[in-house]
Image: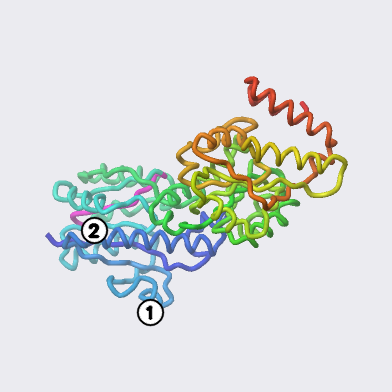
Amino acid sequence: MRARLILMLKFPRPGAVKTRLIPALGAERACALHRALVAATLATIREFSATTAVAVEVRITGSPDDQAARAWLGEGVAIREQGEGDLGARMERAIAAAFAEGMEQVVVIGGDCPEIRPHHLAAAFGALTEREAVLGPAADGGYYLIGLRRPLSALFRGIAWGGAEVRAQTLAAAQTHGVSLAALEQLRDIDIPEDLPVWAATPAARASGQGGVSVVIPALNEEETLPVTLAAVRAGGPFEIIVVDGGSRDRTLAVARAHEAIGLSAEGGRASQLNAGAAAAVGEFLLFLHADTLPPPGYADIVRATLARPGVAAGAFAFAITGEFSGRRLIEAGANWRARRLGLPYGDQGLFLRRDAFEGLGGFPVQSIMEDYAMVRRLKSRGDIVVTPEAALTSGRRWRERGAIQTMAINQLVLAGYALGVAPARLARWYRGE
């Protein structure tokens, strides 16, 4: 049986691809992700083609010329223009041409579903031996694959492309016209910032982030603080910077994106922000950093070297505070004694660990306060917690505003309350002075 697999693609131009991701990633990074997703899809297609006789064709739109398209996709694939019209018209045209050229089965996919594997493609063609059509449902209400045994124009007309009703409208059209239709496993594609963890979990993403340090910064109303922090982080050579906003009333997210950071949002407090950032991160190593804390110069190399030591589960930087105020030296000395002697650094020292270790622990416990303390306690069961000689520099604003003695007293009260089992929500109110 003559069969064809058609891959529908947009040419990778910043600002023209993955547009719903641009607010979070920026145009250049969104375009780079588009390229990475297409590369992963082409690898899946090559793996599938190695064991089948299915012909492969790429239908492209937005390419300046054939040479540019070929430079992107390589020599081993047939490339044709999609032509004019909406997505439905372009898919209908490609499918009609395939049947006119003698194909008996045609399957169409896009390039942004990193979960698609060769067995999904095989299942699609297999389903077409019994049904007139096959659909691969996407979690967002669309579909990542459609396959036909004959031209069926009704499935591509009157559809609100790009919306959440695409699959429902397609199924309704199939039912109206008596089309027998099979369904594949539901998968997730990458369209919006909330989809980024899907990409981050793939082997292709993990490979791209090998050896890299992803810096995750939870932030709330930090538009004034972030520029200095992000400049210091950028100077240290991270793989990526992810700022996760917790519902700011200022321009925190806009500032983050203006400084080439990935900007995400998460509700539910700092633990939820940290977990959301880690889920979207691609780097092999994770560094969790407060928005008002500056990492030491060369921190990425320090992270890698520290975690390469045998028996080390996680690390943190030594503690230092900006500015001069009464009691500063005593606070620094106490924090560093606790971190080194007891193996209990806090989040304002910059906590870092391997991504697989973080995932193995299930992330930060989602609680109102002390999420860093709880995480470190769990990490201690897995190995040593190392505090580096190099210091992270934390803003002294909290000590200056509240007073050093009062702030230290509140910190100790919260710590004692946590040890005695006081509910984190109540501890958070104590910490805020409520």
Give the image location of residue 390, x and y in percent: 67, 53
Q: Secondary structure at mark 2?
A: helix
Residue 144 lies in the magenta-colored region:
yes
Q: Which mark is residue 67?
A: 1
At a point 54% along the width and 49% down the height, the residue shown is: 286
- Residue lying at the far right in this picture: please name it: 326
Q: Secondary structure at mark 1?
A: helix
C-alpha separation, residue under disc 1 versus residue under disc 2: 26 Å
Horizontal side of residue 434 vs 211, given as left or right? right
In this rendered view, identify the residue nearer to me: 282 or 295.
295
The reply to whether residue 346 is visible in this rendering is no
Give the image location of residue 94, x and y in percent: 28, 64
Residue at the disc numbered 2: 48
At a point 74% along the width and 31% down the height, the residue shown is: 411
The reply to whether residue 72 is visible in this rendering is yes
- Residue lying at the far left in this picture: please name it: 1
Q: Amino acid at mark 1?
A: Gln
Span highlighted in magenta in the image? 140-151
Residue 394 lies in the magenta-colored region:
no
Mark 1 or mark 2, earlier in chain: 2
* 2, above or below 390, in the image: below
At a point 33% along the width and 45% down the height, the residue shown is: 137
Q: Amino acid at mark 2?
A: Phe
